[in-house]
Amino acid sequence: MKKYVNCLVVLAIMLAIASVSYGRTLAEEAQAVRDYLNVVDAKLATAKQANNKARVDLLHVEKSASLARWYKLKASMDVAPAPVERVITKVITVPQQIAAQPVAKKSNGAFGWGLNTMLDGRYINTGKGSVAGSAGLMANVVLDDFIGLGSMFGMSTNAVKFKLGMGYYAGGGVGLKAIPVYAGGIINLPQWLGGQESFLTGGLNYVVDGNGQTSGKIGGDVFFGITADMGLGLGKTGFAIGYNVIRSNTVSSKGLSLSVSQPFDL
């Protein structure tokens, strides 16, 4: 149970940091963590003055996670190369024939880009329209856990992934037309009895173009799912159920949602 609680806390923090740019230097990352700690301390002081115990407890959790990140970065910056002792050894070379061993070549994807992507088919049950809901398609780039969030909560290094993407939704009985951009993440949960793989996924979306040919509002989703190998040679397919909200400027679609996701290596 404790692992699942940790997973939910990680998912909440991931939504807050999903828009952080990838590729900062170690010094820039350390400065960002220091700045964030100052912000959390200021919020703590305000919450304590207002005697808001619930917010104080939440801010302490955020501060603990940020401190863990700071200590990890500081350790990385303080590490100095260990001295190397030179050892002079007399080597006697004996000619011999060694059979060449084939080296397995790591696959870089269909186009050789080494890019992990995922295609999600979504359906939101709104109870309106001829098909009683909205249909959508999302294309996402899947990134590794570049901030070490999984390690902070005692999970494996591959337990947490981040997603950035874009998609299209239509229908719902209200004429929804929306092109949202998306930022979120995936948490691979511990396997069930029998080895069944499951996951949590969620994120935020923002409609950049939709009804009225203008931008919309912020929405979001959260899903729980399992994976299964469908024998397509493309990896394991994800099947998930959850709740999804898409908001254009004048029309919104929200409700119980189904998702089918398929990874692709490009």
Image (cartoon, rainbow, N blue to C red):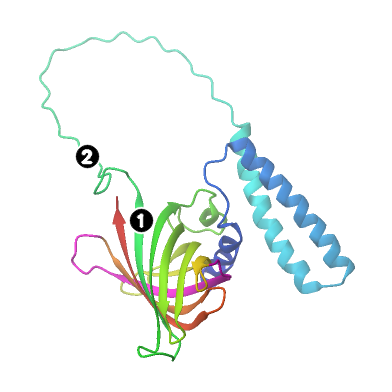
**Foreground residue among 204 and 239:** 204
Magenta run includes residue 222: yes
Q: Nearer the viewer, mark 2 or mark 1?
A: 1
**Foreground residue among 137 and 34:** 137
The tag earlier along the polypeptide, 2 or 1, is 2
- Residue linked to disc 1: 117
Residue 105: assigned label: 2
Residue shown at 48%/52% (left/top)?
A: 145
Please provide the residue range marked out in magenta.
Answer: 214-234
Check disc 2 and give the amino acid type: Lys
- Left or right of 69 on screen, residue 148: left
How many tags in the picture? 2
Check disc 1 and give the amino acid type: Thr
For label 1, the SS is strand
Q: Quadrant of residue 80?
A: top right
Magenta run includes residue 111: no
Residue shown at 43%/84% (left/top)?
A: 172
Residue shown at 42%/12% (left/top)?
A: 87
From what the image shows, is residue 228 above or below residue 107? below
Residue 254, visible in the rendered structure: yes
Q: What x and y, as percent, mark residue 69?
A: 62, 49
- Left or right of 243 on screen, residue 102: left
- Left or right of 223 on screen, residue 51: right
Q: What x and y, as percent, mark residue 241?
A: 41, 79
Residue shown at 79%/55% (left/top)?
A: 41
